[in-house]
Image (cartoon, coloured by chain):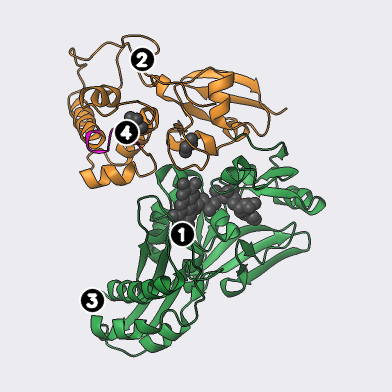
Amino acid sequence: MIPPRFDYTRPATLAEAVGILAADEDAKVLAGGQSLLPLLRFRLASPTSVVDLGAIAGLRGVADEGGHVRVGALTTHYEVVNDPLIAAHCGLLAQATRTVADPAVRHRGTIGGSMAHADPAGDLPAVALALAAEFLVTGPGGDRSVPAAEFFVDYLTTALEPGEVLTAIRIPKLDGWSFHYEKFSRTAQAWAIVGVAAAVRRVNGDITEARVGLTNMGTTPVRADSVESACRGIPAQADAIHEAARSADAEADPPSDLSAQADYRRHLARVLTGRALARAAGS
Amino acid sequence: MPNIRVTVDGVRYDDQVEARNLLVHYLREQLGKVGTPIGCDTSNCGACTVLLDGLSAKSCSVLAVQADGHDITTIEGLAADGRWHPLQRAFHEHHALQCGYCTPGMILAAIDLLRENPDPSDEEIREGLEGNLCRCTGYANIVAAVRAAAAEIRAAAAAPAPRASADPVPSAAAAAPSVEATP
Ligand SMILES: Cc1cc2nc3c(=O)[nH]c(=O)nc-3n(C[C@H](O)[C@H](O)[C@H](O)COP(=O)(O)OP(=O)(O)OC[C@H]3O[C@@H](n4cnc5c(N)ncnc54)[C@H](O)[C@@H]3O)c2cc1C
Ligand code: FES
Ligand code: FES
């Protein structure tokens, strides 16, 4: 279908974008358009105005900021997958981004759009949560930073207030950790039925620290705290890891939908968490 | 209405477009480039794939205004010097199409794949084309066609003499699919 009518602006500065958004609560931000345009075509969204961030300098690209890597909100999935800084310091993000959609969607879709859209089936929010990323936001009231644990509020809902733009995501470097993103879906180019973002740190064959974020196990991404605790100090071996992963669904409240019932999702979360951690730990 | 300046298949256009117009609508309805079909409303099928500054993009998921200042290649811009692109020829020779509806998108997605990976395995071809659905040919011949075209392009790059045996383009509309796209 043809989208409904809207005004279109492509401001050159962030301040201008925030001004337009703050003055009109039915205005919508456009980044890569890979979620927004399908919504407009289905007429599930009918914004009065669409504010294209595409011309604003400084929202795109990856920078090394010492203890963390800063990824501009407008950085495309394609750029994330191919970026050497991300490969060196946030490999889990690159690996998960490689599973998003298909090459054409990855050329246009952005990391900021994926986070702001906050689809519980999206792959990147769980990664941001597991890596304890920080969300940098600019709005009418100025700049603020939101920890990942507070950014995802509900189904398709984030901590972004009206008029606010997500400008970047800061990801702490987990140098020396190993990681794996395990995605379960039935067909190519499909959303995750369940996904698991796992990272581990090992010393002398033992896991000293683990991070686990779950995709599509609730209305927001879920941090699997119980598994993280259960992993501390265990040998980096398959048996011990799968045992620890039995509590993977403890914090989750998974949905039942056409793809899977809640109990099946719980089963998947336990099995896939075991696999993701075992792959991450190289066992 | 916003003004846009775009280059499509090597030709510069200055046009007015409605903000809500999708790039695919602009290509088909304003420029008459009906070689790019629309196959879905969900951004899933890939039939509408074009190259935007050399990278594959689903033209149903880009606003025409977002293409302002950019370079677009559609299936209609691939044949050069009276000869089909090696991928067009390979799809023909390997029976990689039946109704042809998915073919323009498949070929442009395959060009993008070969740009990144000139010698892909069968699995890499399938992954590279995962955003393009074919509902009638099945994928085996499509994979074979891409493999064959990749080999031909690599051989041509190694020995850059023009191939005398290349098929001529039968008609200007040859690259367009044989069925009408839904509006
Ligand atoms: C066929 C298909 C398959 C897909 N499969 C997957 C998949 O497997 N996994 C997955 O994770 N995703 C998938 N996606 C979604 C994809 O990742 C999108 O790129 C992403 O969800 C949205 O990013 P975008 O830049 O295109 O955002 P847009 O579509 O431009 O925007 C999405 C939403 O976020 C808001 N927004 C965007 N940027 C900002 C910002 N900087 N500040 C404030 N608000 C903002 C917009 O207003 C809008 O509400 C798929 C999409 C398609 C079309
Ligand atoms: S028409 Fe564009 S993806 Fe189907
Ligand atoms: S040839 Fe008919 S859909 Fe692919």
Which mark, residue B136?
A: 4
Task: Calculate the distance from the C-alpha at mark 2 to the C-alpha at mark 3.
Answer: 54 Å
Determine contact: label 3, label 1, CB under 8 Å: no
State the extent of the magenta-drawn residues as a range: B134-141
Distance between the Cα atoms at labels 2 and 4?
20 Å
Ligand 3 neighbours mark 4 (CB distance < 8 Å)? yes
Calculate the distance from the C-alpha at mark 2 to the C-alpha at mark 1.
Answer: 42 Å
Chain B tint in image = orange
Point out which mark residue A258 bears: 1
Q: Which residue is mark 3?
A: A283
Tell us which disc is closer to us: 2 or 1.
1
To the question of a shared chain for discs 4 and 1, the answer is: no
Q: Position of residue A112 (x, y in %)?
A: 57, 56
How many labels, in total? 4
Query: Residue A57, relative to residue B93: is it above or below?
Result: below
Chain for disc number 4: B
The residue at which mark 2 appears reads as: B174
As measured in the structure, the alpha-carbon distance from the residue carrying label 4 to the one carrying label 1 is 26 Å
Q: Position of residue A190 (x, y in %)?
A: 41, 53
* Observer-nearest of B166 and A215: A215
In the displayed structure image, the side of residue A265 where residue A146 appears, left or right: right
Q: Which chain shows up in green? A: A
Which one is nearer the viewer's eye here, B81 or A98? Answer: A98
Residue B135 is a magenta residue: yes
